Image: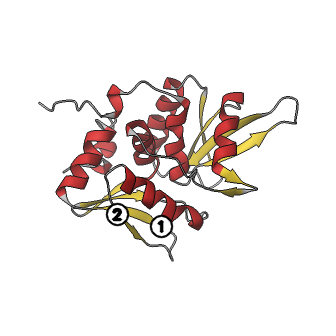
Amino acid sequence: MSQLSFFSAESVPPAIADLTGILAASGQVVLVGGAGEQGARLSVVVDELWRAEGLAEMIADADLEPEIARTEEDSPLVRTSVDVRLVAIAAEWTRGAVKTVPPQWLPGPRELRAWTLAAGRPEDDRYLLGLDPHAPDTHSALASAMMRVGIAPTLIGTRGSRPALRISGRRRLSRLVENVGEPPADPEAVVQWPRV
């Protein structure tokens, strides 16, 4: 029987800011509407349906409307409805049309869970949190944010199509596992979830 950590994602009340973990991965936020009625939408393309379903659950927990669709390449796509409450996140995470990491951003348990759902995968005895290959300027800032929460990663694959933060070592992996909580019930999710 596993004991639930006080710091894990299950012990933290849901908030819209949790979804910024999607932006740490390859998620996007776009402003929609004019000056009078402006909202924003968060979206991310993932490689497995269980990831989209897990993120849709987090979106619903944050009191937003989730939608799961498919891209033209038949990859699962999960997104929020357009909502005025996402405008602040859009302002913090973009400079012009470029995705950026807010200087004060720290990945808490639920942000780490969203990031893991969007782009986490095991690599032997290490764990990778995928980064956005189209936003290389975010990579170092995200590595620094992880260091500030006590999970020092190694930045890998920056010249390829699958950049990631590699987390290795028992203590760092334990901290990640403790934060992200239990995997979704899907058997593939269990295989892909971080463990020590």
Most extreme residue toward the left is 1
- Which residue is rendered at x = 75% and y = 42% of the image? 31
Decide: is 29 above or below 159: above
Query: Where in the figure is residue 177, as x and y percent of width and height?
Result: 26, 44
* Residue indicated by mark 1: 162
Q: Is residue 130 visible?
A: no
- Which residue is rendered at x = 59% and y = 26% of the image? 64
Along the horizontal axis of the image, is 5 left or right of 131? left
Q: Nearer the viewer, mark 2 or mark 1?
A: 2
- Which residue is rendered at x = 57% and y = 47% of the image? 44
Query: Where in the figure is residue 161, as x and y percent of width and height?
Result: 52, 70
SS at circle 1: loop
SS at circle 2: strand
In which quadrant of the rendered view does residue 1 lie? top left
Decide: is 192 above or below 110: below
Query: Where in the figure is residue 105, as x and y percent of width and height?
Result: 51, 47
In which quadrant of the rendered view does residue 86 lie? top right
- Which residue is rendered at x = 55% and y = 54% of the image? 26
Query: Where in the figure is residue 91, as x and y percent of width and height?
Result: 70, 44
Callout 1 amino acid: Arg
How far apart are labels 2 and 1 at the CA level? 12 Å
* Residue indicated by mark 2: 166
Q: How crowded is mark 2: few (under 14 residues within 10 Å), some or many (20 or more)?
A: many
Callout 2 amino acid: Arg
Question: Do labels 2 and 1 touch, CB within 8 Å?
Answer: no
